[in-house]
Image (cartoon, rainbow, N blue to C red):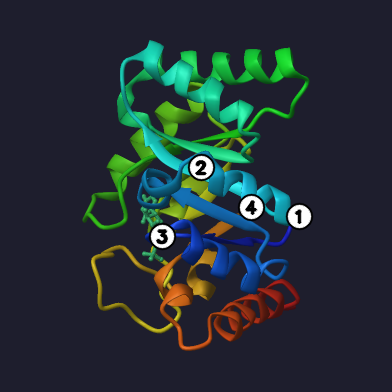
Amino acid sequence: MRPAAKVILALDVDNFQRAKYFLDRLYPRIKIFKVGIHLFSACGPRIVKAIHKKGGEVFLDLKFFDIPNSVANAVRQAVRLRVKMLTLHILGGAQMLAVAVKAAKEEAGRLGLKRPLLIGITVLTSRESKPGNVLMLARAGLKCSLDGVVCSAREAQSLRKRLKKRFLIITPGIRPGGCGDDQKRTATVKEALRAGSDFLVIGRPILQAKDPLAQAEGILKEIGAYERRD
Ligand code: C5P
């Protein structure tokens, strides 16, 4: 049996103070915080250290996509930051992914640290996509030894069925009560769980809620009820 799915809060905010506000309010109910291009461009490693200091874990979502040498060096830096997981675009190609995996192993081994989970981006959930594209990309990523993929809950189920290997599925685009923004391939919490997601990435539905903690608690309760179902 898989362990219960976990919520990752996407800390998509403008500055350190705002990020710290959500960190202080939501930890320890939320334990994993996603730092993406928005927040990392604003305050860099400082926020990663603040999350660790609080006791939380970091999902560094910078979606690396560059020449293999540059990506390998970026991955080494992410290992030094002790992040739990990081993302890179599967479209960057097999060589880029292979050197990233090697760099993560080497750097973690050299420093005696746990290697971060390397998670491949398939197709962004803000875009429409044919299920076949996501499957093809996921297969390519797993062949290069990535630990998991990001995909919408809509594709997760078919990936679980078709790809026999054990791998992590991370699903963004979760909309507990419908959708009215830029996300296209959305799902409710229950749909994501039913599809086999291991991690649910949730940003705006919590960040923009009147009471973010109550919203997070509601989502966690829904996950708990799902895990306890008959
Ligand atoms: O606010 P919202 O819940 O839409 O946030 C979703 C988060 O997941 C954003 O930080 C976005 O960058 C990220 N993401 C995504 N689709 C992907 C990969 C990451 O929406 N394929």
**Residue 155: where, in percent of width, then height?**
40, 54
| Vertical comparison of 129 with 180: above or below | above
Lower position in the chain sequence, tag 1 or tag 2: 1
**Residue 122: where, in percent of width, then height?**
36, 41
CA–CA distance between discs 1 and 2?
A: 27 Å
Lower position in the chain sequence, tag 4 or tag 2: 4
Residue pointed to by mark 2: 60
Q: Is mark 2 within 8 Å of ligand 1?
A: no
Say what secondary structure mark 3 lies in: loop
Tag of residue 51: 4
Residue pointed to by mark 1: 1
- Circle 3 crowding by C-alpha within 10 Å: few under 14, some 14–19, many from 20: many
| Vertical comparison of 98 with 211: above or below | above
Q: Give 13 or 163, whichever is nearer the viewer.
A: 13
Which residue type carries mark 3? Asp
| Vertical comparison of 37 with 143: above or below | below
CA–CA distance between discs 1 and 4?
A: 30 Å
**Residue 152: where, in percent of width, then height?**
39, 56
- Quadrant of the rendered structure where residue 136 is? top left
